[in-house]
Each structure stands twice: as C-alpha cells, then as structure tokens.
Image (cartoon, coloured by chain):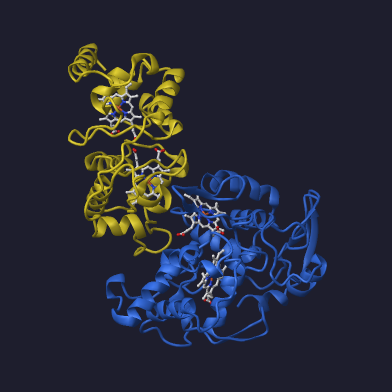
Amino acid sequence: MSRILRGLVIALTVCLGGPAISAAATPPQASECAACHGANGMGNQASGFPALAGLPSAYLQAQLAAFKNHERGNAIMGGMATPLTGPDMAALGDYYAALPVPAGPVPPALPAGPGADLAQRGDWQAGLADGIPSCDSCHGPGGAGVGAQFPRLAGQPAVYLAAQLNGWRDGTRKTGPLGLMSAIAHRLSPAQISAVAAYYAALPANTANGAKP
Amino acid sequence: MKSAKLEARRVLTLALCGAAWLALPNGAARAQAPAPATFSPPGEAAMPTGPFGDAVKLGENIFRNTPKYAPQFTGNTLSCDNCHLDGGRLANSSPMWAAYVAYPAYRSKNKKVNTFGERLQGCFRFSENGKAPPLDSAVMVALESYSFWLATNAPTGAKMAGRGYPELPKPAQPPSYQRGQVVYAQNCSLCHGADGAGTAAHGAVVFPAVWGKNSYNWGAGMSTINNAADFIQANMPLGMAGTLSAQQAWDVAAYIDSQDRPQDPRFTGSVAETRAKFHDNPLSLYGTTVNGHVLGATAQ
C-alpha cells in the first residue's frame, strides 16, 4: 500500500477515535486495521469490510499470509499484509481471535427462502458429485463457524460474502483446505450467491443470547 | 443384499505388516458405474398438511436429527441423515424412496423376510447403537410416513436406479490399513478428527464420529469394509464426492473399520464366538487382530 494511503488510513483511525482497547494490549498495526475492521474488530457492514473478531487465529493468520503471497488477491489487503512478518501475523491473529463478538440483535423473523434453503439443506439437484452440501454442514448451525478451518459466516457483510464466493469462481481466491470451498463456489449460480450472502448477513454474529437460527 | 454374493466368494487371508488382512476374493467383477436415477421424490413444498403431514414432518426431523427427536432409541450421536444424505432423498446415498418400495424382503443378516419397519429397527439397533423402537411406536410411524411420502409414485417392487450405495469394483490390491491411514490423514481428519470422534461446535455435532463410542457399532452395515468403501467413494469427502479412487476408498474403509467402536449388540460373551456367528465374512474385521489388538475385545 502506498505511503499516502497508509497515512490516510491512520488519519482516519485517529478521526474515528482510535481503538477502544489500550495500545499496550494490542499489536502496533491494529490501529491501522481498525480504520476498516473497526476498533472492536466487527468490521463495517456499509463498506463491506469483514468482522475479524472471534475468528480463529489460525484462519486469520492463513488469510494474512495468503494476501501477502497473492493466493488471495485483494489490492487493499495485499498492501496491508505485505509488510507483516510471521510473528506480526500471529500477534494480530491472536488479538482478533480473542476480541469478544457482541451478541444480537436477533432479527424478529429469521430469513426464509432460497438463501435459507441453501444454507440449511444445500442443493442436491445435480446429484452427488455436483451437488451442494448445506453451508451449515461445514460452517456449523447458523453459520457460526466450526474449529479453526471453517470460518463464521453469520453477520458478515453480504457484499463481502458474495465477493469471496466470486473470488473462488474467478480464481482470485485460492485458499482453503482440500479445495472444498473452491469446488462448492464453482457450483453456485449468481442468484444462489446473492441469496445465500443476504441470508448469512442477516444472521447475528453471536447467538449466545439464545437465538437459534 | 450383498451378503449372499459375498458368502459365495473364495476367501484369501494374508498377513501384511503384522496385521491379519483379509484380501478380497477373485469373485465375479462388481457392477460398474450405476445407471442414473430417474425417480425424484416430491419437493419439500409438496409436504402434506394435517395429521398425516405432521407424521411426515416428524419423520423428517427424526431422520435429520435422530439424537434429538428419538433420544430414547439412540445410543450414539449419529443421525440417519449422516449416512443417507439430503434427508434420505439423494440417489446413490441409499435413499429412502428406493428402500421403501423394496420391502418386504429376505435378509440373510437375520435369515427371515423383513418388513420395512423391521429394516428400520435394525438401523436403530446397529447404526444408531440404540434400541429398536416398537413397530407401532410414534417414531416408527413417523419414519415410515416420511419414507412412504418420499416414495410417492414410485413403483412397488421395481429395481430402482439409485438404490443403496453404488458397488465399487474390487480393489487391485488388498485393502491396506497403512495406506488407509494416509488417505484418512489427508482427506478425512480435517472434519472427522485424527481420533475419529468427529467435531462438535456450539453444542451441535457438525462432523459425525467415524469410530469410538459415538459412532456406529460392530453390528452395523458400515462396519463391513465393502459397505463403508461404497459409501465413502460415493459420498465423501463431503462436497468432493467421487474424488477418491476405488483403491483409496477401500483402504480408508479398512482403516476406519479397524478401530474400536461400540460392541455388537448380539455379543455372546466371546469375541471369537460372536465373529463365528455373525461376522463370518472376510469384509468384517471384527475379532481379527490389528496392530496387536483384537477388534471387539475392548469395544467401547
């Protein structure tokens, strides 16, 4: 990232009031990250910046490494990740993984329709080899995330989710174990991508308050 | 279904790396790629309403989350759906619409003609490591209603394409625990865990157990390596079905079916006797010695 953009980012962070957590507890870069990912690490729905809070550290580190080595192509994040060393990535990953994910608000009616169907049941019309398992069967109930390798989808911005699925389809994102997500993204239609992205974006990132999507 | 054929096969035993391996016989070549399924079950939106609809819906719930909706008959954390994908709708994942119209039928497993209800009872006893629900119980009525509804307009007694799991050709080399262990580490442990116990998240089982106390028991169809190989090649890794070679599927099936799991409920008190009575089949490793350990002797 150019020095000007970097300066801009820092200036923006300062304008937004800076990170809420004391600088001592946070890696030095986190103040830059906060400009887009939020001081609480919950991202920015309107701009489509993903939440990082509560995602597994190993997953976050793998993504930062992938931005740096272009396995995951993104101009902004490529610039942000390039100066980071392995230990920097580890510190950032641990930091964001430990940030709490605020609960709710739970939507009054959970979204129904084709997005919900795909998320909960999949689409096996094409048979076993080309079928789409339900997203929840890997990302967990309500897309809440499973272990270190299956990230949370709930509450992420719809544009972000759709961009990732399209990224696997057009080859700009190559990451992920066993090529699972790439294979699945290639079987999704544009209509399915927008429906399922809208569905997960509408779910609360944290359902600890009892909501059962 | 397959056992009669198997019994007729010549058995060849060989020892490999200290483990007693039972190689596959030179039987008749197995069926090749299955004919494409032509039947499709009714869509979810067509589910009937009223008391019958309620039974169908309950049946679907039991099928998709057995430990929650039939806890009194379930002894592990598996659901029917874990082995019969897409709620028992999916061709080549042993769909219920194809099974429903295939009973009553003779089964060599218990040497009598079984009704569909009796077939379901076997699934609870073995695959679910639980207890057989009485034939007139609400659980059984619901599962039969659901299967009956999925089979709407299916011809009774006809051979349905897509029934069961497609039979794999016999492997070029005898199934190997060692090779299977490598296949498992590379393709399966991500989800099912290095210890086979599966993965839970937020209080729900996401990836089911493939061995250990929460998995199917030693009496289950899946505990014989041909059934496991057929299922795995057609269904696993989830989302990547059909990517393992037949040899890899046989090897990894032998690996998971060489691990400890719950005792066969027909256990007579002696592993050797139980093997002789119920596992006299080269494709069951129950009672054989693997890595110095007699399978079934310390069943969980």
From the viewer's perspective, tell me whether residue A165 is left or right of residue B261. left
Give the colour in which the image draws chain A: yellow
As drawn, A31 above or below A200: above
From the viewer's perspective, tell me whether residue B113 is left or right of residue A116. right
**Residue A203 showing in the rendered view:** yes
Residue B190 in the image, given as x and y percentages of width and height: 52, 44
As drawn, B276 above or below A19: below
Quadrant location, the N terminus of chain A = top left
Quadrant housing residue B152: bottom left
Give the colour in which the image draws chain B: blue
Quadrant housing residue B87: bottom left
* Relative depth, front residue between B166 and A161: A161
* Relative depth, front residue between A198 and B268: B268
As drawn, B293 above or below B32: above
**Residue B39 showing in the rendered view:** no
* Relative depth, front residue between A188 and B10: A188
Quadrant housing residue B65: bottom left
